Amino acid sequence: MMLGVIDIGGTSIKYGVLGGSGELIHHDFVPTEAWRGGDAVVEKACEISDLLRERFDIEGIAISSAGQIDNRNGSVVFATDNIPGYTGSPVAERVSRHTGLPVTVENDVNCTALGEHWKGAGRGVRNFVCMTIGTGIGGALFLDGHLFTGSAFSAGEIGHISLYRDGKPCNCGNSGCYEQYASASALIALIRDAYEGEPDLEAFFDLVKEGEEVANEIFGRWVDDIATGLQSLVHSFNPECIIIGGGVSEQGEILRGAIEESLRKKVMPNHRKSLEVRLAEQGNRANLLGAAHHFIESRKNG
């Protein structure tokens, strides 16, 4: 079975085709143009579906999307103004009606977790927390061998756990949220405060590797905030591992090792026995693979 796979993000829409062997045989992207609003974004997903159907004999479409997603009927329960007017969009219904094909939709970070469990760093792991570090912090919980989505499809919003009382204001309406301190955006803000010029993450991490004092102080503070948030999650869910994704995870071992070292110092002895921090292995492909896995399982379970 060949599937069309689409990942709707705030900046770009990635898409491809999953072959019968479970491998992506085509992969591309287009700008989301999120400023045009939710209707236009769904229309673009329909256009991408048409493009895929012209070139490949696909039997269904699996979608990964930003926002809190009702993964049973494929609609958007809630989305921020990153995609204006996206809340309430019946994505699966509209794309299915347009194409005549079965369509499923799941949250993007949930798809990252599903993709990594299927073909990445979560293979064989029954309990893990998946965290994507980007503009904000995305999260997904994989508990007892299954993705946990909560009572209203909204579990895993770890970016909005409270890290500091009366801290920095967050776009969720609260203050002191985790993503205001542990995201890539938070790191960029720290770099901007310390250095002249426009922040460059690659150049910053080069300074960290070289042992430059200010860079290492900033990096240490940022990693400590990441580990403090993870401490609460580890004590709550006792996972076997934390999987770190998002663009910043491309920094590799310097990031993974620092987070794991800081975290292990913060958690209780029994929680650290088998605890590992791993980097996501599938990168940008994880969401597409996870969307496909969700489609396959949904069809299997009726």
Image (cartoon, rainbow, N blue to C red):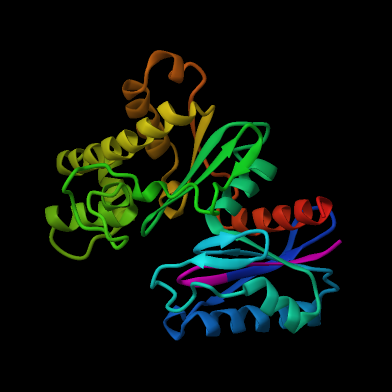
Q: Residue furthest front?
A: 151
The residue lying toward the viewer, choosing from 121 and 139, is 139
* Quadrant assignment for the N terminus: bottom right
Q: Name which residue lies at 27% across and 35% down.
A: 224
* Side (left or right) of 160 relative to 271: left
Q: Name which residue lies at 36% across and 59% down.
A: 135
Q: Name which residue lies at 55% across and 54% down.
A: 153
Residue 261, percent from left and from top? 36, 26
Q: Is residue 74 above or below residue 277?
A: below
Q: Is residue 40 above or below residue 251?
A: below
Quadrant for residue 255, please give it: top left
Q: Is residue 230 above or below residue 20?
A: above
Is there any visible trace of residue 51 in the rendered image?
yes
* Side (left or right) of 90 relative to 257: right
* Quadrant assignment for the C terminus: bottom right
- Main SS category, magenta section: strand
Residue 292, percent from left and from top? 72, 57
Residue 50, percent from left and from top? 73, 83
Q: Name which residue lies at 60% across and 49% down.
A: 282
The range drawn in magenta is: 1-13
Is there any visible trace of residue 211 in the rendered image?
no
The residue lying toward the viewer, choosing from 93 and 7, is 93
